[in-house]
Image (cartoon, helix red, strand yellow):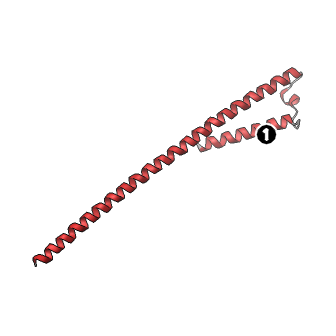
Amino acid sequence: MKELKTLSDVVVFCYAMFIALLLTDLLDHKAIFEIATEEQALTLYKALGAVGAGLMLVKLLIGKLYITSLKYDRHMAQVKINELKADLYERKQAYRSNSYKESVRMEMAVASN
């Protein structure tokens, strides 16, 4: 999921740079897209805006999925930690119980001698 998020970030950044270069006239849109009239240029900019909006929507959705994935991973790690804590507690209780039984046996053995 992280790779997909990184890829979407890179694509959106490159697209934003491309649009910025077109808007500042560092790239000639007439030569790149073979535009002859102003109406075609307007249509081109509308299409580029729509594509940009779509890319940002995809980036937003991927970001939400990535955050959800991180939250799920954190939850699963917390569940595992709780299971390990419970196992450790049970082992400590079993050790204490066995130690107590052994000490009672030793006292009875000493008392019977």
The image position of residue 68, as x and y in percent, is 55, 41
Quarter assignment of residue 50: top right
Give the percent coordinates (x, y) of residue 74: 50, 48
Residue 8: image quadrant is top right
For the C terminus, the quadrant is: bottom left
Q: Position of residue 59 (x, y in %)?
A: 66, 37
In the figure, is residue 101 to the left or right of 28? left
Say what amino acid the circle numbered 1 marks.
Answer: Met
Residue at the left extreme of this rendering:
112
Q: Is residue 14 left or right of residue 96?
A: right
Residue beneath disc 1: 17
Instruction: Examine the rendered structure and indicate whether residue 80 appears above or below residue 66.
Output: below
Residue drawn at 17 percent across, 74 percent down = 107
Disc 1 packing (10 Å; few <14; some 14–19; many ≥20): few
Q: Residue 17, position in %: x, y? A: 79, 39
Q: Nearer the viewer, residue 10 or 74?
A: 74
Q: Residue at x 39, y 56 (%)?
A: 85
Q: In this figure, what is the number of numbered marks?
A: 1
39 sits to left or right of 4: right
68 relative position to 39: left or right = left
Q: Residue furthest bottom?
A: 113
State the residue at coordinates (35%, 56%). Answer: 87
Q: Quadrant of the N terminus?
A: top right
User: SS of the residue at dot 1?
Assistant: helix
Asked if 6 appears above or below 44 in the picture, the reply is below
Relative height, residue 65 to residue 44 (above, below): below
Instruction: Report which quarter residue 56 is drawn in.
Output: top right
Residue at 62% x, 35% y is 61
